[in-house]
Image (tube, helix red, strand yellow):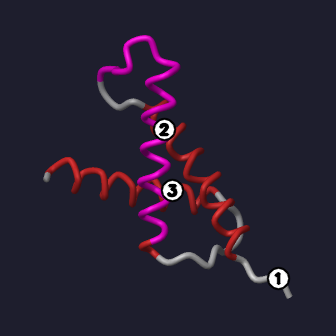
């Protein structure tokens, strides 16, 4: 149960940071932000595990955070492009 709560919190942080990186306003609610953040975090963990020798570093793993935020930025851009209304 603790892992799920941690993943939700980590996903919320990653989602908010990803939205801060993207210029302009995104018409996305907080639930979608958390879901995109969780997906970005999972992708970041997977990618870092693929390119890292050990998959684990002591202290704060800045590369994993950066990769997770980048993945969430891409997912946010894809989501907004798919859901935006063109007039």
Q: CA distance from mark 2 to mark 1?
A: 31 Å
Q: Which residue is mark 3?
A: 17
Q: Earlier in the sequence, mark 2 or mark 1?
A: 2
Element class at badge 3:
helix
Return the x and y of residue 67 as percentages of the image width and height: 54, 37
Q: Is residue 21 above or below residue 59?
A: below
- Look at discs 2 and 3 and give the one toward the viewer: 2
In the rendered view, tell whether residue 80 sits above or below residue 71.
below
Image quadrant where residue 45 sits: top left
In the picture of the structure, the residue carrying the numbered disc 2 is 44
Percent x, y for residue 11?
39, 55
Residue under pointer 1: 86
Q: Which residue is most to the right?
A: 87
In the image, residue 57 lies in the stretch drawn in magenta: yes
Q: Residues within 10 Å of mark 3 (few under 14, many from 20)?
A: some
* Residue numbers of the magenta segment: 32-58
Q: How many marks?
A: 3
- Specify which label sits upstream in the sequence, 1 or 3: 3
Q: What is the crowding at mark 2: few (fewer than 14 residues within 10 Å), some, or many (at least 20)? A: many
Image coords of residue 72 (percent x, y): 55, 52
Please give the name of the residue rendered at 73% of the width and 67% of the height, measured from the top-left corner.
81
Report helix, strand or loop for mark 1.
Answer: loop
Compared to residue 86, the image places residue 80 above or below, namely above
Residue 4 placement (x, y as % from top left): 23, 53
Magenta stretch prevailing secondary structure? helix
Residue 19 inside the magenta-drawn segment? no
Check disc 2 and report its element: helix, strand or loop: helix
Is there a contact, CB below 8 Å, between mark 1 and mark 3? no
Outermost front residue? 82
Q: Quadrant of the C terminus?
A: bottom right
Give me the residue at 62% from left, 79% from top: 27
Farthest residue, direction bottom: 87
């Amino acid at each position: 149960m603790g892992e799920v709560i941690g993943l939700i919190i980590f996903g919320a942080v990653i989602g908010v940071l990803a939205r801060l990186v993207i210029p302009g306003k995104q018409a996305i609610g907080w639930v979608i932000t958390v879901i995109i953040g969780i997906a970005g975090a999972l992708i970041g963990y997977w990618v870092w595990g693929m390119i890292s020798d050990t998959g684990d570093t002591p202290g704060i793993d800045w590369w994993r955070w950066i990769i997770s935020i980048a993945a969430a930025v891409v997912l946010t851009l894809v989501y907004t492009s798919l859901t935006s209304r063109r007039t």
